[in-house]
Image (cartoon, rainbow, N blue to C red):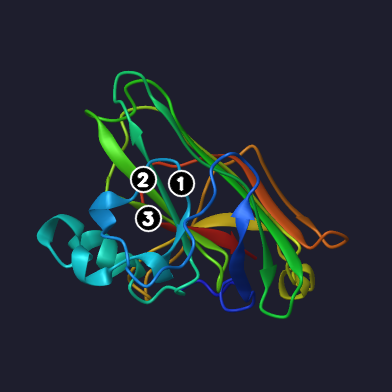
Amino acid sequence: MKKVLLLIGVIGLFLVGCQDSNLDPVSPTAEKMSISKLPNETPVTLDNIDFSSMKLNKWRGLYNKIFRASQHSVIIKNKIWGTLGGTVKLISFSTNTSNGRPVKIKATLTFAPNALNGDEDIYMVVDPDDASLTFFPDISQFQGKVTLDATISGIDVSALSSANSPLNFVYIPDDPNADIQIISNDDVNLDKSTGSVSVHGAKLKHFSRYAWAR
């Protein structure tokens, strides 16, 4: 397996904030939400989700992907119409790290028309503990262009900034013995002054888990 320095395991974020838009994240409640009732375009932390509702066959793949994720991970979904395309967008989600550092997350997943074979509910999960992005359902190959733009700012990037190898945005396979894969993109950056990592125009060929690495 190729040895790389991942942001995974280095960053500890604590998502307790809100999205700077007219759509507020669902606040923690005593009664947890079934995954089937997750509203479109509304960020929800996993501690609000009833995980038992994800053990049915329809949701088993999503459950397997995120059951080990931080309970403060943010999940958001949107309906994408195959012939029209569309976006799944997390707009300036403001929060704090576990030690109180302010953090902001922006992420937009864009589907060109006919990138999907039919209409799909698309889920994006941002894990605050390892700054990774995971997508569902499992789609092994898109039929057209699918791109990701994402920025996480206000985090501790010292581990990545100390390495000499180039910064990349990568696909992380489920098999820990498999090599990661560098994802083609228009631009990937690390800004030590703002504690930011970003990627623009990442060209996704399929759904899985992605993160920054050296």
Quarter of the image for the N terminus: give it: bottom left
What residue lies at 22% left-to-right and 28% top-to-bottom? 118
Q: Amino acid at mark 2?
A: Pro
Horizontal side, residue 45 vs residue 121: left or right? right
What residue occupies the far front of the structure in this picture? 30
Is residue 177 shown above or below 204? below
User: Which mark sits nearer the N-terminus, 1 or 3?
Assistant: 1
- Front label number (1 vs 3): 1
What residue occupies the far left of the structure in this picture? 57
What residue lies at 56% left-to-right and 68% top-to-bottom? 128
Which residue in the structure is indicated by mark 2? 39
Q: CA distance from mark 2 to mark 3?
A: 22 Å
Q: Amino acid at mark 1?
A: Thr
Is residue 11 shown above or below 119? below
Which residue in the structure is indicated by mark 1? 42
Question: x%, y% of residue 13?
Answer: 63, 72
Question: x%, y% of residue 166?
Answer: 70, 59
When asked about the image quadrant of residue 176, the answer is: bottom left
Q: CA distance from mark 2 to mark 1?
A: 6 Å
User: Which mark sits nearer the N-terminus, 2 or 3?
Assistant: 2
What residue lies at 74% left-to-right and 75% top-to-bottom? 100
Q: Secondary structure at mark 1?
A: loop
Q: Quick one: 208 or 127, which is closer to the camera?
A: 127
| Crowdedness near tag 2: few (<14), some (14–19) or many (≥20) residues, C-alpha within 10 Å | few
Q: Secondary structure at mark 2?
A: loop
Quarter of the image for the C terminus: give it: bottom right
Which residue in the structure is indicated by mark 3? 208
| Crowdedness near tag 1: few (<14), some (14–19) or many (≥20) residues, C-alpha within 10 Å | some
Q: Secondary structure at mark 3?
A: loop
Question: x%, y% of residue 195?
Answer: 79, 63
